[in-house]
Image (cartoon, helix red, strand yellow):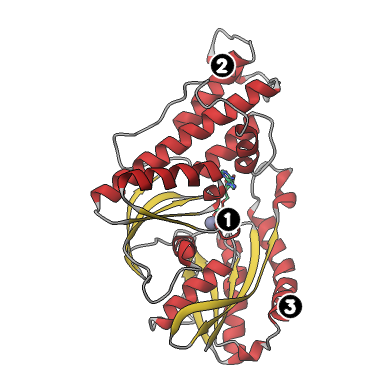
Amino acid sequence: MKTILAIETSCDETAVAILRGRDNNPDHELLASEVASQIAAHEKYGGIVPEIASRNHLLYAPRLLDRTVSAAKIDLSKVDAFAATSGPGLASSLMIGASIAKGLAIGFGKSYLAINHLEGHLLSPFFRGVDHEDEIRPNISLIVSGGHTMLVRVHALCDYQVVARTVDDAAGEAFDKVAKMLGLGYPGGPEIEKLARNGDRNRFDLPRSMLGSENFSFSGLKTAVRYLLPKVAGLFYETPEEWRLTQTPYKFDERVLADLCASFQQAIIDVLVTKTIAAAQKYDVDLVTVSGGVSCNEELRRQLYEACGRNGFAFKNAEPWLCTDNAAMIGFAALLRLRAGFESHLTEEIDPNLALAT
Ligand code: KG4
Ligand code: ZN
């Protein structure tokens, strides 16, 4: 029996989770998982302010640690290993979680595991599904979040090859930026998804960028929306400079707003689905997985599931509560690594640009 306590502080979510792995059984039990979001603290600045994020991690982490330990009903001295996200992410945020986990490992004389945030996302579709028949089997993994959009060829645990990434914005970033242009709240993904449910996805013709190449690009789509909005609002400008000087967001009626959201969302989904299926075909796997904040999107999950079915691939998505940043996925990755004999040295540093595969 191995008990792991994991801490995630790579961006603006402070999270702690405790998991217990069973002997001779690859499955595990989640004892407690807590997440404290800082959205409200950053919202008024229109983006994440690194210093505010790290100060808040320092404030929330000890309380969250207390709460998680009492919810799990265990004694900290019974934990076998302490894990933390070591990158990629904001340096000053990563340092908080890693320092706490290292301090606990030193204090209790236990193991320390440094976990790549992207590996946490990538393994999260297997969170409830690792049993004897279903190891981390080869798959094409779409990681789609606010900071990342990539396709990873997963050979096995710890054996990854990034086969495509975004050359500019991440898909979640595009959702957030377009939501802002439309005058919607942050994070933009859930807001756009809600409105898109009643919209016509074919009403506005938006670009599907770089369909011919493996990599992703979403900044052209964002710019196309920016140019479309004044036209849809019935405002015409002679020069791009003229509209750049105008105040957005524009006011749209409910119907138009829903159609804009549905058309934009579909443009993103088309690109994600097309490239994921093409990668699964190219690398000849029989499983496609999806994880990360944007994979909360029900329409994306549904269309990926259907496209996988049509093309003969099995499909696994992370459960919605595991899609956005959390520590349970970090603990799960740590548990699998510990079981496979990996441990990190206490001198292992955080790395804001940590690569998934070297
Ligand atoms: O994985 P995550 O919590 O953080 C990163 O590691 O980036 O992802 C957050 C991103 C945000 O950009 C948010 O707008 C997007 O995930 N997101 C969604 C949905 N829920 C969250 N995007 C589309 N549809 C959703 N339902
Ligand atoms: Zn993430």
Give neighbour class at mark 3: few <14, some 14-19, many 20+ (Cα, 10 Å): few
Please identify the quadrant where the C terminus is shown: bottom left
Q: What amino acid type should be assigned to the residue bearing mark 3?
A: Asp
SS at circle 3: helix
Can you identify the residue that label 3 sits on? 66
Q: Which quadrant holds residue 211?
A: top left
Q: Is residue 252 above or below residue 310?
A: above
Between 24 and 229, the one nearer to me in the picture: 24
Of the two numbered discs 2 and 1 on the same chain, state the one appearing first in sequence: 2
SS at circle 1: helix
Can you identify the residue that label 1 sits on? 320
Q: What amino acid type should be assigned to the residue bearing mark 2?
A: Glu
Q: Is residue 73 left or right of residue 207?
A: right
Kindly report which numbered mark, 3 or 2, lies closer to the viewer in this rendering.
3
Can you identify the residue that label 2 sits on? 241
The residue located at (49%, 44%) in the rendering is 302
Between 232 and 173, the one nearer to me in the picture: 232
